[in-house]
Image (cartoon, grey):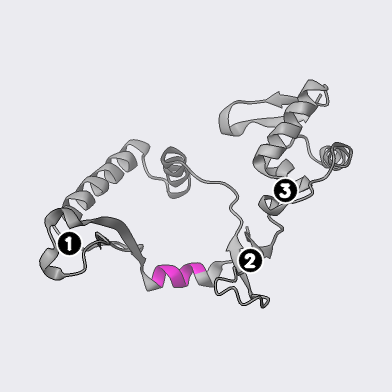
Amino acid sequence: MSVYYDLYETPDLAKSGEKQPLHARVVLKGSYTAEEFMKQVVMCQHVAHAQLVGVLDAVANELKDLLLNGFSVELGEIGYVSLSLSVDKKVLNPKEIRSPSISLKDINIRINRQFKKDIENRIELQRFHSPLRVKNPLDEGRCLLRLNKFLEEHPCINRRDYAMLVGKTKKQALQDINAFIEQGILKKYGVGRSVVYIKG
């Protein structure tokens, strides 16, 4: 399984007018909710669901308490969690500092070096043109040709696969799919995140 990435030109912050070097960004395939993540752990790591829910709740509660007491906390192989603070921009002199001038800026996670190394050693990268960059998406006819070809080889398609197939955003893909359903080209099958589309 690969991690998709795309290349983007770095913004010219100095406004030099010179061509900027490219930088890579991961093209996300989606996201996991907490419940979906727990189901994945239960299925792959053979842990009881109720036990996992209890452990995660206990970890979250203890983590909050320790952070609120001024500790940095190590979370096993993942890394360290700590707080960072911000100072009101109006304060220029340390003598002017008052408690309301200081507030929570962020909760930081510093990833353990070994955890990062394990990911680095196993990662497989694949170039992919992100549909979020599309300026001139394919017209309906060309999209339909690609869809029909896909459905000749596969029994169904989901929204994400359709978006990747025709190079459109998720929103654009859903608009196309709804139009194809109205025209009787596709039929919706399933519910929630398991929805797929089959030939009408």
Residue 17: x and y, percent? 66, 75
Residue 166: x and y, percent? 78, 46
Residue at 75%, 51% in the rendered image: 135
Location of residue 114 with respect to 5 vertically, above or below: below
* Mark 1 neighbour class, 10 Å CA radius: few under 14, some 14 to 19, many 20 or more: some
Q: In the picture provided, is 72 more to the left or to the right than 163?
A: left
Label 1: which residue? Answer: 71
Quadrant for residue 146, please give it.
top right
Label 3: which residue? Answer: 164
Question: Residue 125 got which mark?
Answer: 2
Location of residue 191 with respect to 45 vertically, above or below: above
Q: Secondary structure at mark 3?
A: helix
Total marks shown come to 3
Residue at 22%, 45% in the rendered image: 61
Residue 60: x and y, percent? 26, 47
Per the rendered image, the range of residues in magenta is 114-119
Q: Is residue 189 magenta?
A: no
CA gap, disc 3 and disc 1: 44 Å
Residue type, label 1: Phe
Residue at 82%, 45% in the rendered image: 138
Q: Nearer the viewer, mark 2 or mark 1?
A: 1
CA gap, disc 3 and disc 2: 17 Å
Location of residue 12 with respect to 3 vertically, above or below: below
Q: Main secondary structure of the magenta part?
A: helix
Question: Residue 173 got which mark?
Answer: none
